Image (spheres, coloured by chain):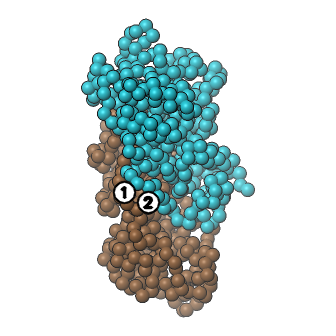
Chain colours: A cyan, B brown
């Protein structure tokens, strides 16, 4: 068995019995490989949500996950935050000639665990191999189809609405940054990569349109998502510093490097805007899921600074959280 | 305005008004850019076809097209050959830092022309930028959703059925090979990249289940597709050398380089297996479309060499066309 990806591994498909399709059958199961380049799927009634993302993260293996887990969970989350049930994923690999096959195997196994955990299926795929130096190890595109539920997470936001986050923020971004810079004091950091579909479906089913809006807080972090929500609106969003869940390890790295976890990437966190009357009940339901263990209300919608996001600090000072033009890190997902 | 892609162009989305999203709005129109990472789409009743492909072709611009046109048409064709109507595409770019923005613009314009011509929509997208040397200029993933029609192009194949191809074969593969090798005698060669959806929908509507099977003949060419169809079956497939349409320019390059157009890639050609009684009528309908101008019956299904594909030569000799393990060219699509 070859140890490294060769240009020839990119040729042809199932019938040629190449190493890559053998690996995929081995890990994903026989039903994952079709004669056709396309899959026939039956998502059921309702409008669909369709999304795509290419993952180019470096390093490809990191504390808490790898590029494969990220590629599955990231696309699931893009669908789940729309108030839809993710059903089917596609998967397109670009592999660099010379990439270790053992690493590809680990990534495929990780993707398999992720789809099984989330309850979605990879139904169609594609693999391209490019010459050494023409790509950086492995890029993965996942596209996904979900089915809209009767409720929708795109409803009218009102002053007084609560702002909820499902756990500690900045874990992914700060963990990757520490790993890349080989920071010796970064022990205990870990990416939060997780699928949010089951938690969000449960919340949607129980609370329906009391959930006004949901968005995953990936690149740019919680502060950027809140800015997108408030942009050009008549309301503002206030968050309370004392309520924002941040792991000690993340705070430690942030303080030393002068970073702000509010702007750091997450891969398993969403911001929910909800009816304030239902907020504590929603938090309770979220906490029954591992992904929502540390769910908490962190703020509210008000009218004090229309179109802006601001933080009330421990000492009751107020500070605008602007929309940053630049991310803190490239190739974070 | 910057002339080259910078790492910063990969940051953030619509709200940050980056050059890339401005370009996309400019070319694809305002409705193409949503606040959300996902699109809500309504394909209508019926099972769906879902497919994905990543395009890594080099060179990215070539006679008859470019990587953008290929990425649109290739994914449309994967759906159309299933007997489905392609409706929605996603589009994921990986851009190399330093890539010329003027080239990106040309590619986007080409994609826009391709989707308009084919009558499909790009509804969701993603752009990642990686460091210089971490990718080769531009890779494009397109995934697509189509709606199955009542007829299906996956029916039982019977001895006697006709084999149809919609025009000259090997144009794409031989054209790219000539271009890469800067062959001076390659004048007049051009990729055949074209969307087959409208032609195939028309054939499906008029002839329904008289169309047994359709597959686009991309990597590996017509010979490989026919081998996939015949593999493990009780029938064989015979094609007639005198019927196979090949452009003189393609034949010329093939003779000099010792290549076989039957194994060369196409990007706008499909093989149809049909009821022999209807074959000539089907060809007539195909010829009313530019993509089917040179459609012709090239062979038939028989029982002479079960599981195999063979060619009857001009002098009535018979030669097996085996399934090749290796493509003639890497990065052909």
Badges 2 and 1, same chain = yes
Judging by the rendered image, the residue that carries numbered circle 1 is: B43
Judging by the rendered image, the residue that carries numbered circle 2 is: B48
Spot the residue most to the top.
A315
User: Which chain is disc 2 placed on?
Assistant: B
Tell me residue A82's x, y (percent).
40, 41
Nearer-the-camera pick, B291 or B82 = B82
The image quadrant of residue A60 is top right
Nearer-the-camera pick, A169 or A286 = A286
Tell me residue B261's x, y (percent).
51, 74
Left or right, residue B226 beside residue B66: right
Q: CA distance from mark 2 to mark 1?
A: 8 Å
Element under disc 1: loop
Left or right, residue B326 beside residue B3: right
Tell me residue A67's x, y (percent).
57, 41
Q: Residue at x 47, y 18 (%)?
A: A243
Element under disc 2: strand
Compared with B215, B95 (above or below) is: above
- The mark that comes first in sequence, 2 or 1, is 1
Left or right, residue A278 beside residue A195: left
């Amino acid at each position: 068995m070859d140890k490294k990806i060769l240009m020839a591994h990119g040729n042809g498909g199932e019938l040629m019995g190449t190493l890559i399709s053998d690996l995929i059958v081995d890990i994903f199961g026989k039903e994952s490989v079709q004669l056709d380049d396309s899959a026939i799927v039956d998502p059921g009634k309702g409008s669909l949500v369709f999304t795509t993302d290419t993952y180019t993260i470096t390093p490809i293996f990191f504390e808490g996950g790898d590029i494969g887990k990220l590629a599955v969970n990231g696309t699931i989350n893009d669908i789940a935050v729309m108030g839809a049930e993710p059903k089917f994923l596609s998967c397109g690999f670009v592999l660099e000639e010379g990439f270790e096959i053992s690493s590809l195997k680990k990534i495929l196994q990780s993707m398999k665990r992720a789809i099984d955990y989330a309850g979605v299926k990879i139904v169609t795929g594609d693999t391209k191999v490019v010459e050494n130096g023409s790509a950086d190890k492995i890029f993965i595109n996942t596209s996904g189809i979900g089915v809209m539920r009767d409720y929708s997470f795109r409803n009218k936001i009102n002053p007084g609405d609560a702002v909820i986050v499902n756990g500690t923020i900045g874990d992914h971004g700060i963990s990757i940054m520490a790993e890349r810079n080989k920071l010796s004091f970064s022990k205990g950091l870990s990416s939060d990569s997780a699928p949010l579909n089951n938690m969000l479906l449960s919340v949607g089913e129980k609370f329906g349109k009391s959930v006004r809006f949901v968005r995953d807080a990936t690149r740019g972090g919680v502060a950027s998502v809140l800015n997108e929500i408030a942009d050009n609106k008549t309301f503002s969003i206030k968050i309370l510093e004392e309520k924002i869940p941040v792991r000690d390890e993340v705070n430690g790295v942030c303080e030393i490097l002068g970073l702000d976890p509010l702007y750091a990437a997450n891969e398993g966190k969403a911001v929910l805007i909800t009816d304030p009357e239902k907020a504590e009940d929603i938090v309770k339901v979220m906490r029954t899921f591992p992904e929502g263990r540390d769910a908490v209300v962190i703020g509210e919608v008000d009218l004090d600074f229309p179109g802006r996001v601001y933080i009330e600090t421990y000492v009751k000072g107020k500070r605008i959280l602007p929309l940053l033009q630049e991310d803190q890190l490239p190739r974070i997902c």
